[in-house]
Image: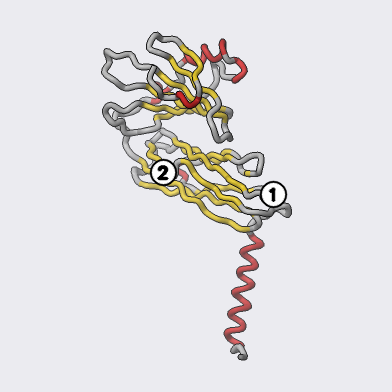
């Protein structure tokens, strides 16, 4: 069956546009195989001058080769940053951090994580809900406990954490539920430190837990607790948050 010249021209133009789109996507000549990319979590709450982090984990197929190019598109008010632009079989974790500024509106935002391999792009969506913190948060209250830093410097100098380093700190849950524990995140270019405080009646002294994950790694590698007697000690990563 013959194709009408007008329809033939439409088909040719469509194929040309498709070809142009494929060429516009950066590709590595060594790319092959397939992969999946997952964000943990997929949705967070944050607040003005607060923070947040999404862990991007890539799972490659057995025949995977080359690299996955990752980029982020987000509202400038979120001040989103990407840690690890390329993912490979050896480097499988990237991170998207946010530091919402004072102009961020109290609404929901979508962050587009664009990932490309073998010339094909896909988009992963991470969601941020901006809220007013309850109770209010003072940035000066979120410093990494200096006594913990001093203990690490003395007992675990191999970690490279020492006094005088700069940390970006924020509260993980802007709205505190009565009776729930309080979690903070402290991060620099090397480490992400999660601190969990037990919030119970003030006459009961609660332990404080610390969990360390190296930037760009999928799993935590070190944990410690400050027990009810005020002493620090190393614990297993799977013991983080348990009562002592």
> Residue 109: where, in percent of width, then height?
40, 47
> Residue 128: where, in percent of width, then height?
40, 43
> Residue 101: where, in percent of width, then height?
42, 37
Q: CA distance from mark 1 to mark 2?
A: 30 Å
Q: Nearer the viewer, mark 1 or mark 2?
A: 1
In this rendering, the answer to whether 146 lies above or below 4 is above
Q: Which residue is outermost to the bottom? A: 1
Of residues 148 and 80, the one drawn nearer to the viewer in this rendering: 148
Residue 3 at least partly seen: yes
Quarter residue 178 falls in = top left
In this rendering, the answer to whether 180 lies above or below 156 is below
Q: Which mark is residue 65?
A: 1
> Residue 196: where, in percent of width, then height?
40, 24
Quarter residue 33 falls in = bottom right
In this rendering, the answer to whether 28 lies above or below 147 is below
Pointer 1 with pointer 2, Cβ within 8 A: no
Of residues 196 and 141, the one drawn nearer to the viewer in this rendering: 196
Quarter containing the C terminus: top left
Residue holding disc 2: 43
Image point (41%, 13%), residue name: 227
- Element under label 2? strand
Image point (62%, 90%), residue name: 2
Give the side of residue 147 with respect to residue 3, left or right.
left
Give the side of residue 222 with respect to residue 172, left or right.
right
């Amino acid at each position: 069956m013959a194709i009408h010249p007008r329809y033939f021209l439409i088909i040719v133009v469509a194929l040309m546009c498709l070809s142009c789109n494929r060429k516009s996507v950066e590709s590595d000549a060594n790319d092959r195989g397939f992969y999946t990319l997952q964000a943990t979590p997929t949705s967070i709450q944050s607040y003005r001058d607060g923070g947040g982090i999404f862990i991007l984990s890539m799972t490659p197929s057995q025949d995977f080769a080359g690299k996955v190019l990752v980029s982020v598109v987000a509202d400038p008010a979120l001040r989103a940053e990407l840690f690890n632009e390329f993912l490979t079989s050896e480097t499988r974790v990237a991170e998207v951090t946010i530091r919402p500024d004072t102009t961020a509106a109290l609404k929901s935002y979508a962050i587009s994580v664009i990932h490309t391999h073998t010339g094909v792009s896909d988009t992963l969506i991470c969601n941020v809900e901006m809220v007013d913190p309850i109770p209010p948060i003072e940035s000066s209250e979120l410093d990494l406990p200096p006594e913990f830093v001093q203990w690490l410097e003395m007992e675990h100098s191999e970690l490279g954490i020492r006094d005088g380093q700069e940390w970006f700190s924020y509260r993980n849950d802007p709205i505190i539920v009565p009776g729930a524990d309080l979690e903070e995140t402290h991060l620099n270019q090397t480490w992400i430190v999660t601190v969990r405080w037990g919030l119970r009646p003030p006459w009961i002294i609660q332990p404080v837990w610390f969990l360390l994950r190296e930037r760009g790694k999928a799993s935590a590698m070190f944990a410690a607790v400050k027990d009810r007697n005020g002493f620090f000690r190393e614990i297993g990563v799977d013991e983080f948050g348990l009562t002592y």
